[in-house]
Image (cartoon, rainbow, N blue to C red):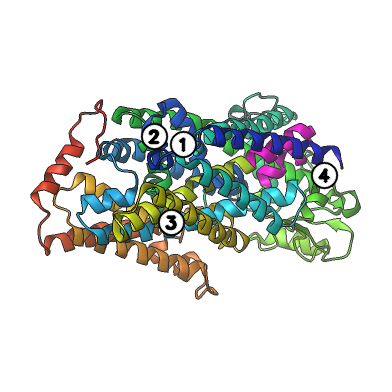
Amino acid sequence: MDDLKLMTYIAVGLSFALYIGVAIWARAGSTKDYYVAGGGVHPVVNGMATAADWMSAASFISMAGLISAMGYDGSVYLMGWTGGYVLLAVLLAPYLRKFGKFTVPEFIGDRYYSQTARIVAVVCLIFISFTYVAGQMRGVGIVFSRFLEVEITTGLIIGMGLVFFYAVLGGMKGITYTQVAQYVVLIFAYTIPAIFISLQLTGHLLPQTGLGADLANGQPFLARLNTVVTDLGFANYTTSSKSMIDIVAITFALMAGTAGLPHVIVRFFTVPKVRDARSSAGWALVFIAILYTTAPAVGAMARYNVIATVNTHVAQDKPLLAQEANLKAEDRPEWMKRWEKTGLLKWDDKNGDGLIQHYNDKSKNPEVLAKAEALGYKGNELTVDRDIMVLANPEVAQLPNWVIALVAAGGIAAALSTAAGLLLVISAAISHDLLKGVIAPNISEKSELMAGRAASAVAVLVAGYLGYNPPGFVAEVVAFAFGLACASLFPTILLGIFSKKMNTQGAIAGMLTGLIFTFCYILYFKGIFITPMAENIPANWLFGISPEGIGSVGAILNVVVALIVSRVTPACPDHIQHLVEDIRTPRGAGTAHAH
C-alpha cells in the first residue's frame, strides 16, 4: 500500500472513530433527545453544529468547483447561501423556536389548524430532502471512489452504512455533537490546503488576501488568470455572462431556500431559550464565513493550477495555444492517473499526437478556434468534473500526503453530516408528523422511535439510489432542493408568522402551486427523471430565469395564490389569530412552551 493511501485510511479512520464515539456517548434516550437533542444545547455549540449541517458536500466539494468553472457567475451560490442565513436568523428562527414544536410540518399543521396542511408540508419536505440528499450521496461516492480507490457504488454503500449508524442510533442529540466534531475536521481540511496554495502562488498566508495579490512574477493573480482562460477560449473569469434577472432570481431562491430548509430550521429547536435561537444563528454565520470567504480563492487557484499542469506556458509570457506548451501524455502526473480511475477526469487523444490539448473547442472567439485548427487540434482532450476541484486541489499543487488525506476526511465529514441531518428530518416527518400526528395519534413513544428508525433505513436506501444515479452535479442538485424549499415551505412559514388572516385553504393552495410549478419547470428543462423535453438555453427560459432560479417565481405564485384563496374562503379562527400575535410578541428571553 502506498503512503498516500495508508495516510488516507488513517485520517478517515480516526475521524470516523471520533464521530462514532461521540454518537454512542450522546445517543438518544427519548423522542425529545431524538428530534431536538433534549432542547439543551449551548448556542455556540449549536452554531458549530448548524454550520456543519449547512456546509454540506455542496459547500465543501462543489461550491469552489462551481466558482472554479464559472468564475464570477459562481458567486451567486456564495451570496445566496450566506444571505439565506440572515433571513433565517431575522425572520424565522426565533418565532418558530417560540412556537415550540419539533418539526416544520407540525408548525404548519398547528398554525393552519389542519391535518391536510400538515400532510402537504410533509410531502414538500420529503421532496426537498430527497433532492438535497441525492447531492450529498453523490459527494460521498466521489470522495470514497477516489481516496479509498474503490468503485463509486462501493463507496456509496460504505457511506450509507455509516450515515445510517449514527443518524439512527444517535438521533438529533448524537448528530448535534457529532456535527461539532465534523465541523472541526472539515474546516481544517478546507483551510489548510488553501493556506499552503496561497503561500505557494502569492506568498500570502490568508487565501482571502492571496486572491487579490500578485504572483511571484509580479503580475496580479486574477489578471493573469483572466488572460490564461480567455487565451484558451474560455469565458472571462471575473465578469458575468448571466442576465441580471437570473442572478437576482438564483440568489433569492438560494436565500429563501436556505431559510426554508427543514433540516436547518429544526436546529433552532435544540437550544434552551428563544434568544439562544438568534444567538446560535449568529454563531453559525461566523463559523460558515471561515469556509465561504476561502472558497473563491480555492476555486480560482485550483483552476489556475489545473491549467498550469497541462499547459507549460501558463507561468510564462508565451502563447498558450502552441504545440510546445502542451503536456506529453506520458509525462502526466500521478494525480491525473489516479483521478482517471474514477472516471471523473478523462483524457482522449483526438488527434493522436500524444499531447494533451486543453482549450474551449466551443469558444465564441473565432481567433482561438482558427489558431487551434491551424495547429491540427481536433478538439478539447481533457475533461475535468467540476466536483473534483477541491478534492484534487492539494494533489495538483503537490502538497504533502497528510494534507491530501485530511481533505479526504473533510470531504466525507461534509457530505455525511448533512446527509445524517436530512435523514433525521425525513424520519421525523414520517414518524412524528404522519404516523403520530395523523394516522395513529395514540402510538407509544417507543413505537414512534422504532418507526422513525425504520423510516431512516428506507430513506438511506432511496438516498443511496439517488446518489448512484443523481440528476446532476452536486451543487446543481442542491440548488434545485433550495428552489423547491423557496417555492413551497418558505412563503407558507413566513405568512404563518406575519399574516393573521392567512387560512388553511390559502396555505395549502399556495404550497401546492409553488411546489408543482417549480418541480415541473425543473423537470422540463433538466429532465431529472426523463429525457429532457426542451433545450436548456436562456432564450427558452421563462423571463430568462434558469431552472436554478425558478423557485423565486414559484414563491411569488405561492404568495399570490395563498392571498387570493384566503380572501374568498372562510376567515382564520380568532384563537389562531391570537396565537400568531403571541408568536410575534417580543418576549425573546422567555423559555418556549409547547402548546
The image shows residue 267 at horizontal and vertical percentages of 40, 38
Mark in front: 1 vs 4: 1
Q: Which mark is residue 38?
A: 2
Residue drawn at (31%, 28%) of the image: 273
Q: Amino acid at mark 1?
A: Lys
Residue drawn at (74%, 57%) of the image: 151
Residue 100 lies within the magenta run? no
Q: Which mark is residue 128?
A: 3
Residue 395 lies within the magenta run? yes
Residue drawn at (49%, 58%) of the image: 131
Q: Amino acid at mark 2?
A: Gly
Q: Secondary structure at mark 2?
A: helix
Distance from Cα at disc 4 to Cα at disc 2: 58 Å
Of the image marks 1 and 2, the number of the one nearer the N terminus: 2
Residue tagged by mark 1?
173
Mark in front: 4 vs 2: 2
Q: Is residue 154 left or right of residue 122?
A: right
Residue 194 in which image quadrant? top right
Mark in front: 3 vs 4: 3
Pointers 4 and 2 in contact (CB under 8 A)? Answer: no
Q: Secondary structure at mark 4?
A: loop
Classed neighbour count for the residue bearing mark 2: other residues with Cα under 10 Å, few (<14), some (14–19), many (≥20): some
Of the image marks 1 and 4, the number of the one nearer the N terminus: 1
Q: Secondary structure at mark 3?
A: helix
Q: Amino acid at mark 3?
A: Ile
Q: Is residue 220 left or right of residue 176?
A: right
Of the image marks 3 and 2, the number of the one nearer the N terminus: 2
The image shows residue 527 at horizontal and vertical percentages of 52, 70
Residue drawn at (39%, 63%) of the image: 518
Pointers 3 and 2 in contact (CB under 8 A)? Answer: no
Residue 71 visible: no
